[in-house]
Amino acid sequence: MNTPRLLLAPMEGLLDCTLRDLLTRAGGIERCVGEFIRVTDSLLPDRVFHRILPELRNGGHTSAGVPVRAQLLGSDPVCLADNAARLAALGPAGIDLNFGCPAKTVNRHRGGAALLDEPELMGRIVAAVRAAVPMDMPVSAKMRLGVADDRRAVECARAVAEAGASELVIHARTRDQGYRPPAYWARIADVRTEVPGLPIVANGEIWTADDARRCQAESGCDTLMLGRGLVADPGLALAIVGMGPQRMDWPAVMHLLQDFWTQVGAQFEPRYRAGRLKQWLQLLRRRHPEAALAHDRLRTINDPEALALGLFGAPGSWSMPATDAGGGVQADKWSSSKREGAADRSVCLGA
């Protein structure tokens, strides 16, 4: 069995530019996909793309030099194409299309996994975006096996392939299965057999190097996409490719947490900082007993300074939050990108 290539998944509300930076610096990841950029009936201004994908200002790469594709979510082929063209001019490592998000709020507005019941529309979206961006820019897609069942998985994959996608990531569960184990990796192999010309990446329920080997064997895929598993153990990618231990040791994790805290202090208002740190601790608990102890000890603490003292110890071991030129805390860049309204947007051509 070949050593797999490893990609980092997009995870709305968790895997932002800060975690992408740290996890790609930990090693083993060849490429990332950013959180989805929601497209409705407007042509988004450049600042929205930059806020959601700050790596655009670094040539479409994380600080470790790992390329990042931008992901678009929506159901209007013309508007998605217009936004893809504008986004492509900013230099991402590629454009990815979201056909897999299971969130009810997204699906209610005909986005994400809801489109898996409309393979023909999926194909039109891929074809429109493919035609709108330079030919040397990859256009990929991410999907689940279906909505309530997986009967249309092959039909969806074939529509994506025939429309010109260069790659398809398949999360091996349906929308209705959410994130409940198991993931049905063998079903990906069935899709690969029926759509042989399309490179397919397997995703879902990969928490350990053993999981990765089983996924590779059952799916037949040489490329895997990691999500929650890498957040729970930042050393997972290196373990899978045989360059690290089966689990990153806790002192190394703490070093990443300290760096994370420094960046969170520079990017978030004080009221958001504790939640961001505890969110990561919550996932780290799955692979690190020390994280479980820390989370249980600190879960009721919301004051940033008290939380940092409780986790890292003396102030000399962690950085104080950054301030702006006037001495105030820098604005919450992340939340401002989520609140971006319709002001200063152009109507999509043809929408």
Image (cartoon, rainbow, N blue to C red):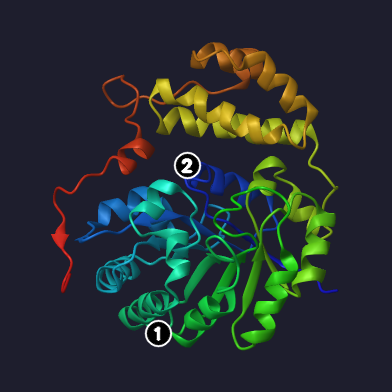
SS under mark 2: loop
**How many marks do you count on the picture?**
2
Report the quarter where the C terminus lies.
bottom left
Viewer-closest of 142 and 237: 142
Viewer-closest of 168 and 184: 184
Question: Which-is-in-front pick, marks 1 and 2?
Answer: 2
Expressed as whole percent of the image width and height from the top left, the position of residue 293 reads 74, 20
On residue 135, the disc is: 1
Expressed as whole percent of the image width and height from the top left, the position of residue 13 reads 47, 42
Q: Residue at x 35, y 23 (%)?
A: 329
Which of the two discs, 1 and 2, labels the residue nearer the N terminus?
Answer: 2
Residue 5 lies left or right of residue 351; in this view the side is: right
Give the vertical position of 28 relative to 135 (above or below).
above
Expressed as whole percent of the image width and height from the top left, the position of residue 138 reads 47, 76
SS under mark 1: loop
Mark-to-mark CA distance, 1 and 2 = 31 Å
Report the quarter where the N terminus lies.
bottom right
Q: Residue at x 50, y 17 (%)?
A: 304
Residue 16 shows in this picture: yes
Q: Dots 1 and 2: beta carbons under 8 Å?
A: no
Give amino acid for label 1: Met
Residue 11 lies left or right of residue 53; in this view the side is: right
Give amino acid for label 2: Gly
Crowdedness near tag 1: few (<14), some (14–19) or many (≥20) residues, C-alpha within 10 Å: few
On residue 44, the disc is: none
**On the image, numbered disc 2 is attached to which residue?**
13
Residue 93 shows in this picture: no
Q: Residue at x 77, y 37 (%)?
A: 287
